[in-house]
C-alpha cells in the first residue's frame, strides 16, 4: 500500500506511558505491554475514531488483551484485522478518555531473518525498530509522533546464557527470578521517545568501559561498549570515538548528554550501519571493531564518524524527532552534516573530508537521483519506508543543511540551531519547523530555499564570464536549471584569480543565485581574472562552464586555486576530459594529455605533509563518477579507457612514482610491527603510497612487467603488518593474471590472507570483496564458486554485501555482454527476498538503472526485473524497487 506525505493526520489518541516485560525463553519470547492511553488534544478530527494499534500479523501471536485489568473478548471488545488491532472508541470514552491496555503476544526471535524487531544474532538477542520494527514486537501506535515514556522495561532470561541484559535509559533494578537460573533487569528511560528508538539486548557479552564528565553540568556518564567476548580487544577505538563526539558536540553546538549511561552493542547480523536507540546504540560489528591488523585506515575513520553520527542523533533525532517518516531528512540530513563536520575537525582537514564526501555524493546520490528511484530529500510517497533510507535523504539532505550554514554563516547557523532546540525539544516536528527556526533566528526569508525539500534530480548551474577592461569590471553570469518550475535559492561560493599571476584577487564570496539567470559584478579589477566557481562544492549541483578554453582554465585552477577543493576538482576535470577522449579513440599526444601530465607531475612533486590531499590529487575519478557525466554508459569501454589513462600516466612517470614509493616505504619502515600510527600524517603516507602502488601495478602488458608488478605488490603484502597496506597490496595482486609465477603469487597471497584471518568475520568479508571486485576475465565464475564456499551465507548481511553487492559494483564485469551478471544478481535477489526484504530490495537496486545502458544491456536487465516482478510471493520492499525500476 502506498502512503502519501500529504495524508498525514495526527493520532486521535496517544500512548503517554508504556511498561513492558520480555520473558525470553528458548524458541519464543512472551511480550507483555501496558499502554496508558489518552485521547489526543491535538487531534484534528472531532468525530470519534476507533483505536488502531499497529502490529505485524505474521510476527505476532496475540495471547490476551485486557483493559484496566479486565480481559477483553475478541470480536466483541476488539478485533484483529490484517496487521491492525482495533479497539472501538467507546471503550476509551466510557473511561473518561484514559485507560490502560495490556496486551500479551508471543514472538519468535529465533526465526526472524528479516533482522527487524527482536531477533537473534549469534548467541545474543537484540532489536532493530527503525523504521517500523516495533510493531513486530508488540501492538502499538508505531509512528514517530507518538512520544511516550517507557517507564519500566523488564527483561527476563537465563542468566548463564544471557548474563547481560540491556535497555534504554537507566537500570533501576536487577536480580534473581527463581532457582532455575533465570534473572531479570528493569530499565527506565525518563525521556519521552517514539517506538523506533526502543531497544533491548540480552547476551553473553564482554565490554570496555570508561566515564565522561559533561561540561558545563559536570554530569558523570558511564560509557560502555559491548561485543561478543572474542572481539573485546577491538572496542577501544569506538569508545575513544564516543568521548571525542561528546566533547565535540559540547564545543560546537553546546549540546550535552542527558542520561547517566551510554551503551553501545556491536552485533554481527545487522541490516544497516548503526542505530541511535536512546542510551543504547546498536552497531554493525563492521562499524565498531577495529585493530590495525583487521581494520583499514578508512575503517577507522568510518567507525569514528558513525559513532559520532549515532551520538549526535541524541539531540538531532531523539530529543527532537520526526513527526512522520517523510521528514526523515530532518534528522538524517542534519546528523550527517554534523558527523561530516566532526570528522573534518578530527582529521584536521576539511578539504580532505570534503573531497571524500563529494566523491561519495557524486558516485551514489547523483546516480540515484537520475534514475527510477529519484525523489526529493523529503519524499512524497512510499510503499516501504525502509526503501527511503537513501543517499538522497542522507547525503543530499546533508548538503541542504550545509547550504543553510553557507548562507547564514557560522554564527547564524548556530543561532538557528539554538532556536530549533528551544522551540522543539521533546517534540516530533517537520522539515518546515527546522527551516522556520533558521529563518526566524536570523530574521531572513527562506521561503524560496524551501524548494530544496520538494525538488528531485540534480540541478545544473551554468556560468559565463566577461571582463570589461575599460570599466575594470568582471561579470559573472549564473543560470540554473532543475525539475522545479520556479528557480531554487542556490549559494554559489566564488573566488577570483588574476589570470596572469594566479594570485587570488577576490577572496571567497557567497553569491545567492535566486533567479533563473543572474549577473554578478566585480568592480576594481586591474586585469582579467579566472573565476573559481562553486568553491568547496557550495551546492549539490552540476556545474557547467562556457569558457572557450575550459581545459586551459582547469589547468590554471589546478595549479593556482587557493581553495583546496576546487584545486582538486580542476584536476579531476582534466582527468575526466582525457578519459572521455580516450574512450572516443582520440590520439594521444593531445593537449589534454599535456595538461594532465603537467597537473599530475605538479601534484607528484609536492613536498608537504598534506599526503592525503596529494593522494586524492593523483587518483582518477571513479567509474561511477565518470558514468554520471554520460547519457549512455558502456561500462566495459569506460573501464578500459580509465585503465588506459592510468597506465599512460604510470608509464610517463614510472621512475618518479617508483622513487617516491620507495622513499615512503623507507620512511615508514621506522615504525615496527604492530606499531601502526593513526595520525593524519601516517594515514596520508599510507594513502599516498598505496595510490602509487596502484599506478605501478597498472603497468602489466608484458611478462616482464607482470613479473615486476606482482613482485612489488607481493613484497608490500608480505612486509605489511597493518590491514591498510596489506589490503591495498592484495587488491593489486587479485587482478593479476598471465604467467604461472604471477598467478601463484596472487593465489598464495589470497590463501595467506584467508589463513591469517583465522575465521575473523570482518577479515573474511574483505577476502570475499577483494575477489568480487577484481579485474579478472573470469571474475563472475569465481564469484559463483565463492557463493558455494563454506564461509559464505546469504543470511548475514555483511557477508552477503561483501560478495554479491561488491560484485554488482564491479561495473565492467557485472555489465559484461550476455547479461550473465544480471542473471546471477537476479537469482540471488530472489533467494534473499525470502529471508530479508530490506536486503533484497537494496540489492535489487543494482538492476534498475537500465536506462543508463545500451538497448541490449537494458533489455537484459529488464528481463531480470520482470522475473522478480512476477515472483510470488514478493516482499513489498522489493516490489516497490522493482516496479519503480520497470516504470
Ligand atoms: N537511524 C539509523 C542511522 O542513520 C539508520 C536506520 C536505518 N533503518 C532502516 N530501516 N534502513 O543512524
Ligand atoms: Zn542517522
Image (cartoon, helix red, strand yellow):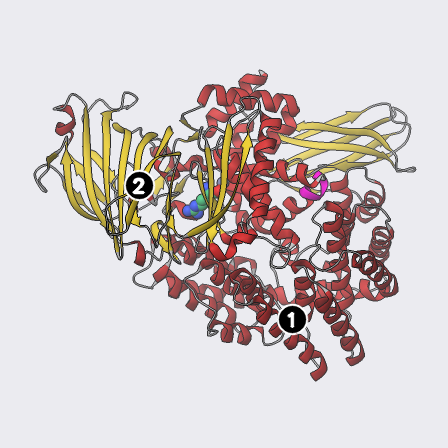
Asked if residue 709 is positioned above or below residue 58 in the image, the reply reads: below
> Farthest residue toward the front?
179
Q: Which residue is mark 1?
A: 734
Furthest residue in direction top, as rendered: 443
SS at badge 2 = strand
Q: Which mark, by number, is residue 412?
A: none
Relative horizontal placement of residue 165, taking residue 668 as reference (left or right): left
Residue where numbered disc 2 is placed: 175
Q: Is residue 7 left or right of residue 349?
A: left
Position of 252 with respect to 700 (left or right) is: left
The part of the chain drawn in magenta is: 350-354
Label count reads: 2
Q: CA distance from mark 2 to mark 1?
A: 54 Å
Pointer 2 local density, CA inside 10 Å: few below 14, some 14–19, many at least 20: few
**Could you tell me which residue is drawn at 47 percent across and 55 percent down?**
229
| Foreground residue among 422 and 530 | 422
Q: Position of residue 868 (x, y in %)?
A: 38, 63
Looking at the image, in which quadrant does ligand 1 appear? top left
Amino acid at each position: 500500500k502506498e502512503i502519501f506525505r500529504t495524508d498525514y493526520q495526527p493520532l486521535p489518541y496517544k500512548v503517554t506511558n508504556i511498561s513492558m516485560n520480555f520473558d525470553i525463553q528458548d524458541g519464543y519470547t512472551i511480550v507483555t505491554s501496558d499502554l496508558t492511553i489518552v485521547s489526543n488534544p491535538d487531534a484534528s478530527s472531532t468525530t470519534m475514531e476507533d483505536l488502531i494499534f499497529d502490529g505485524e500479523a505474521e510476527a505476532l501471536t496475540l495471547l490476551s488483551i485486557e483493559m484496566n485489568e479486565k480481559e477483553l473478548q475478541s470480536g466483541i471488545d476488539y478485533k484483529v484485522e490484517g496487521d491492525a488491532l482495533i479497539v472501538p472508541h467507546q471503550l476509551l470514552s466510557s473511561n473518561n478518555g484514559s485507560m490502560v491496555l495490556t496486551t500479551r503476544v508471543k514472538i519468535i526471535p529465533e526465526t526472524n531473518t528479516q533482522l527487524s524487531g527482536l531477533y537473534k544474532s549469534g548467541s545474543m538477542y537484540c532489536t532493530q525498530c527503525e523504521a517500523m520494527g516495533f510493531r513486530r514486537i508488540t501492538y502499538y501506535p508505531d509512528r514517530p509522533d507518538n512520544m511516550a515514556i517507557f517507564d519500566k522495561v523488564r527483561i527476563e532470561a537465563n542468566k548463564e546464557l544471557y548474563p547481560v541484559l540491556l535497555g534504554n535509559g537507566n537500570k533501576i533494578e536487577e536480580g534473581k527470578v527463581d532457582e532455575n537460573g533465570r534473572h531479570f533487569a528493569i530499565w527506565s528511560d525518563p525521556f519521552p521517545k517514539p517506538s523506533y528508538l526502543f531497544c533491548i539486548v540480552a547476551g553473553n557479552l564482554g565490554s570496555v568501559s570508561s566515564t565522561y564528565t559533561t561540561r558545563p553540568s559536570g554530569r558523570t556518564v558511564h560509557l560502555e561498549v559491548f561485543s561478543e567476548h572474542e572481539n573485546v580487544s577491538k572496542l577501544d577505538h569506538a569508545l575513544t570515538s564516543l568521548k571525542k563526539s561528546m566533547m565535540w558536540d559540547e564545543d560546537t553546538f553546546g549540546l550535552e548528554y542527558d542520561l547517566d549511561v551510554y551503551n553501545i552493542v556491536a552485533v554481527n547480523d545487522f541490516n544497516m550501519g548503526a542505530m541511535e536507540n536512546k542510551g543504547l546504540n546498536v552497531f554493525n560489528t563492521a562499524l565498531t571493531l577495529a585493530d590495525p591488523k583487521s581494520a583499514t585506515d578508512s575503517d577507522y575513520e568510518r567507525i569514528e564518524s558513525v559513532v559520532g553520527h549515532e551520538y549526535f542523533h541524541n539531540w538531532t533525532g531523539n530529543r527532537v524527532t520526526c513527526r512522520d517518516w517523510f521528514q526523515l531528512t530532518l534528522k538524517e540530513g542534519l546528523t550527517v552534516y554534523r558527523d561530516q563536520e566532526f570528522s573534518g575537525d578530527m582529521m584536521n582537514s576539511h578539504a580532505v573530508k570534503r573531497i571524500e564526501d563529494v566523491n561519495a555524493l557524486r558516485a551514489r546520490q547523483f546516480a540515484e537521483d537520475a534514475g527510477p528511484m529519484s525523489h526529493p530529500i523529503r519524499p512524497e510517497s512510499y510503499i516501504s519506508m525502509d526503501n527511503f533510507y537513501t543517499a538522497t535523504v542522507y547525503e543530499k539532505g546533508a548538503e541542504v543543511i550545509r547550504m543553510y550554514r553557507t548562507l547564514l554563516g557560522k554564527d547564524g547557523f548556530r543561532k538557528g540551531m539554538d532556536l530549533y532546540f528551544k522551540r522543539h525539544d521533546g517534540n516530533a516536528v517537520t522539515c518546515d519547523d527546522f527551516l522556520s527556526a533558521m529563518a526566524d533566528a536570523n530574521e531572513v526569508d527562506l521561503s524560496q530555499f524551501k524548494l530544496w525539500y520538494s525538488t528531485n534530480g540534480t540541478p545544473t548551474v551554468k556560468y559565463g564570464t566577461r571582463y570589461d577592461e575599460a570599466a575594470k569590471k568582471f561579470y559573472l553570469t549564473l543560470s540554473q536549471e532543475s525539475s522545479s518550475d520556479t528557480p531554487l535559492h542556490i549559494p554559489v561560493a566564488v573566488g577570483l584569480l588574476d589570470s596572469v599571476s594566479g594570485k587570488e584577487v577576490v577572496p571567497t564570496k557567497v553569491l545567492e543565485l535566486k533567479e533563473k539567470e543572474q549577473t554578478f559584478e566585480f568592480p576594481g579589477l586591474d586585469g582579467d581574472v579566472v573565476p573559481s566557481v562553486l568553491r568547496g562544492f557550495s551546492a549539490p549541483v552540476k556545474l557547467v562552464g562556457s569558457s572557450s578554453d575550459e581545459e586551459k582554465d582547469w589547468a590554471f585552477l589546478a595549479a593556482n586555486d587557493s581553495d583546496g577543493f576546487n584545486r582538486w576538482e580542476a584536476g579531476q576535470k582534466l582527468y575526466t576530459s582525457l578519459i572521455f577522449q580516450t574512450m572516443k579513440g582520440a590520439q594521444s599526444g593531445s593537449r589534454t594529455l599535456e595538461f594532465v601530465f603537467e597537473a599530475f607531475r605538479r601534484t607528484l612533486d609536492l613536498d608537504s605533509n598534506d599526503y592525503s590531499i596529494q593522494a586524492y590529487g593523483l587518483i582518477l575519478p571513479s567509474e561511477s563518477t565518470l558514468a554520471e557525466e554520460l547519457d549512455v554508459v558502456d561500462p566495459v569501454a569506460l573501464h578500459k579507457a580509465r585503465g588506459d589513462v592510468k597506465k599512460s600516466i604510470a608509464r610517463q612517470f614510472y621512475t618518479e612514482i617508483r622513487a617516491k614509493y620507495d622513499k615512503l616505504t623507507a620512511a615508514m619502515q621506522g615504525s615496527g610491527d604492530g606499531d601502526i600510527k593513526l595520525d593524519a600524517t601516517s594515514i596520508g603516507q599510507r594513502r599516498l603510497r598505496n595510490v602509487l602502488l596502484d599506478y605501478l601495478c597498472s603497468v602489466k602488458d608484458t611478462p616482464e612487467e607482470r613479473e615486476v608488478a606482482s613482485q612489488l605488490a607481493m613484497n608490500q603484502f608480505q612486509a605489511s603488518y597493518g590491514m591498510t597496506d596489506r589490503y591495498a597490496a592484495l587488491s593489486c595482486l587479485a587482478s593479476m593474471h598471465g604467467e604461472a609465477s604471477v598467478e601463484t603469487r596472487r593465489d598464495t597471497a589470497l590463501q595467506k590472507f584467508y589463513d591469517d584471518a583465522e575465521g575473523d568475520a570482518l577479515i573474511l568479508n574483505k577476502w570475499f570483496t577483494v575477489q568480487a571486485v577484481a579485474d579478472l576475465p573470469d571474475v563472475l565464475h569465481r564469484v559463483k564458486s565463492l557463493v558455494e564456499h563454506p564461509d559464505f551465507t546469504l543470511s548475514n548481511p555483511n557477508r552477503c554485501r561483501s560478495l554479491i553487492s561488491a560484485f554488482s559494483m564491479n561495473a565492467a564485469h557485472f555489465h559484461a555482454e550476455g547479461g550473465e551478471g544480471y542473471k546471477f544478481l537476479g537469482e540471488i535477489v530472489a533467494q534473499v527476498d525470502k529471508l530479508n526484504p530490506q536486503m533484497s530490495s537494496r540489492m535489487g537496486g543494482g538492476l534498475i538503472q537500465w536506462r543508463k545502458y545500451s538497448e541490449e544491456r537494458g533489455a537484459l536487465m529488464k528481463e531480470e526485473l520482470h522475473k522478480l516482478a512476477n515472483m510470488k510471493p514478493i516482499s513489498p520492499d522489493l516490489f516497490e524497487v522493482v516496479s519503480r525500476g520497470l516504470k
